[in-house]
Structure formats: structure tokens, C-alpha cells
Amino acid sequence: MFTKASLKLTVFYSLFFFLLFWSFSFGLYTWMERSFGESYISQVKEKHYQTGQNTGEFNDDKITVVTVAGEVALNNLVNILIIFNASLLLIIPVASWFFARRTLAPIKQAHEQQKQFVSDASHELRTPLTILLGEIGVALRKQRSNQYYRQILKSNREELSRLSLLVENLLFLAREDQNKHNLQFAAVDITDVISSVIAGLNSEIKKKRLKIIFKPPEESIMVRGNASLLAQLFFNLIDNAIKYTPAKGTITVSLMKKNKAVKILVKDTGMGVSPTIRERIFERFYRADSSRSLIKGWGLGLPICRAIVKRHQGNLTLHSAEGKGSTFTVSLPVVSAKSAR
Ligand SMILES: Nc1ncnc2c1ncn2[C@@H]1O[C@H](COP(=O)(O)OP(=O)(O)O)[C@@H](O)[C@H]1O
Ligand SMILES: [Mg+2]
């Protein structure tokens, strides 16, 4: 598909440049040819009398010399233009091919990413559907006890809620791509958002016997944003810190206000991220091999975080050394409570 498009664009660019240079050459030739005619002779004649040193008449011999000189110059110009245009026959298609490929490169990349996204999403959707179908098939094969049916239904519900969460995530990213989110932005106290996210994750933290350190700042820090998106952002980051930190580890959430921005750091003492995949973990469906086999997930949490942060004109960075924990830093512009309204 892209080779065909590249070829078409090459032909288009080539025609454009050929037309440009041909009309330039033609224009130059016509202009020079006109200049070497009558007007050229009369100009030379004028100069001849003006200088005063030339005493002789501007006779036919001199006119012949001037005419021949003009013809020689014109011939030289024709030769130069022929050589110039002949070399363009080689250069233009090559240059056009190069430019065509450069023009199409970002489109090709976006297309590849989209294809990958669709294929990964279908793959992830297929797994829970296969489980559901399998379980229902086994349950229907013969008469079973009520308890068995209850167990199957419970397991089905778990799979279905995972499935619906996956669809929610996919829908979020698809809407972000199309810029179709109709979001309400208002003044949000970022400390409140983080506190309630931590409260919601408390049972998970306790289950893994993790220690969480969070000291809310005394003054309230306001950002202009969408409270539920910001909650999702910090949920994803703290949820990751819980998932990728072994039992008895520590998670520290800290806030720092500096000038017109607030920095929120989510630090853990977990498995960390190797430098080679530091940027890749923000790609859709990407998961480090170390987490893939052990912990459930789809690799959509961080891409969603990036999208949310971008929506709030902030940025999200990661500092990590493998095996030594990770620190995710969110920077958001702060606003005074009044101007955020
Ligand atoms: N705090 C963390 N410590 C170590 N690795 C992490 C951390 N957060 C994210 N990762 C890595 O980044 C990958 C992508 O994270 P995410 O997008 O949230 O997807 P998921 O959690 O579903 O795997 C994870 O699979 C994991 O390999
Ligand atoms: Mg995650």
C-alpha cells in the first residue's frame, strides 16, 4: 500500500520539478534570445559612441561581430541548459523518491501503530471470551449442582468485569485519538484526589503488607482539571507501584509545589524498569517480560496516564534503575482557586 503511494507521490513530485525546471530553462532561453537581437546590437552601438575612445563608424563588420558573439553565447547557453536538464532527468526521480518516502514516513508509522493496536486489542479480547465460552460449555455438558452453577457464574462475572474494564480502557484511548472527549474541567484540589485514591487502594496495600507514606501538604494545591481523570491517573500509578513492588516494600507519594507547577512523585521500592524499555512501557499493550508472567494486566495503564497528563498540559516521566524501584513524576500546572473556576 505504502510502496504504491510512494511511487505515485514520486511521479507527482518529479512532474512538478520537471515542469518547474523546464519552464525556467525555456524562460531563460527566450529572454536571452530576445536580448541578443536588435536591442542587443543597438545597446552595443550606444556604448560604442558613448565611450568616446572609439572613433570609427559602427559599420556592418562590427554588427556582424556583435551578431556572431550573440549567437555563440546563445549556443553556449543552449548547451548548458541541455546538460543541466539531462542531469535533472537522473537527479529529480531520485530526489522525488527520497522526498516521497520522507513525506509518507510519519503516516506509515501511525498506520502501523493503529494496525498493531487493533491486533493487540483483538488478541486481549479473545482470551477472556475463550475462558467464558469454555466455562459455560463445561457447565452445560451435563446436569450439575446449584453450587457448581453459582461458582461458574461468579467466575463468569469476574471475567466479564475484566472484559468490560478492558473495553472501557480501549474506548478511552480511541476517544483520545479522535479528540472526542467532552470533558468538564474545573478547579480540583490535587491532594484530595490523591488521598481518596490511596484510601480506595488501602486494602490492596494491606494485603501485600506494603508501607505507604503520604504527607499531604498544608496548603491546598489547585489544578484545573477533570477530577475523575486525575483520579484515574493516580490510581494507575499507585496501582502499578502496588503490583510491581514485592511484599513489605514501601510506596511514597509526595507533592512539591514549585513556581507555577506541582510535582507529584510516586516512588516504590519494587522491581524497577530497565533503561532499555523505559520509554516502551508507555506504549499501548507493552509489558515488561518480568511482569508479564507474574502479574495480570494489559499494558494500557501508562498510555492512559500519558494521555491524561497531556490533556492537563503536564508531563509524566520515569526515573528507575532495574531492581531498585521506580519513581514516576507527574508535573501539572497549578492555578489559583479563583482563576480555575
Ligand atoms: N512501578 C512500576 N515498577 C516496575 N515496573 C512498572 C511499574 N509501573 C509499570 N511498570 C511496567 O510497565 C508496564 C506497563 O504498565 P501499565 O501500562 O500500567 O500496564 P499493566 O500494569 O497493565 O501491565 C508493566 O507491565 C510493567 O512492566
Ligand atoms: Mg498498570
Image: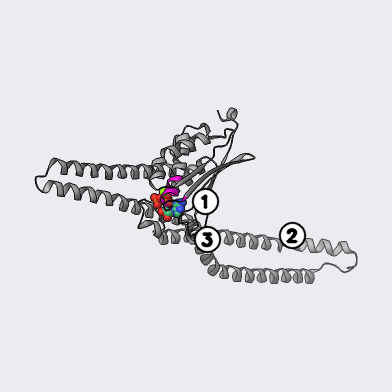
Task: Give the labeled residue for mark 3.
Answer: 99
Regarding mark 1 in the picture, which secondary structure is present there?
strand
The mark closer to the camera, 1 or 2, is 1
The mark closer to the camera, 1 or 3, is 1
Residue 291: where, in percent of width, then height?
39, 56
Q: How crowded is the residue under tag 3: few (<14 C-alpha within 10 Å), some, or many (20+)?
A: some
- Name the foreground residue: 89 vs 192: 192
Q: Is residue 307 magenta?
A: no
Q: Earlier in the sequence, mark 3 or mark 2?
A: 2
Mark 1 Cβ and ligand 1 under 8 Å apart? no
On the rendered image, what quadrant is the C terminus found in?
top right
Task: Give the labeled residue for mark 1.
Answer: 327
Residue placed at 66% from the left, 68% from the top? 77
Task: Give the labeled residue for mark 2.
Answer: 39
Residue 240: where, in percent of width, then height?
43, 49
Image-quadrant location for residue 7: bottom left
Q: CA distance from mark 3 to mark 2?
A: 44 Å
The mark closer to the camera, 3 or 2, is 3
- Name the foreground residue: 182 vs 221: 221
Residue 69: where, in percent of width, then height?
73, 71
199, above or below 294, in the image: above
User: Disc 2 marks which amino acid?
Assistant: Ser
Q: Is residue 282 visible?
A: no
Magenta segment boundaries in residue numbering: 237-249
User: Disc 3 marks which amino acid?
Assistant: Phe
- Name the foreground residue: 163 vs 195: 195
Residue placed at 41% from the left, 60% from the top? 4
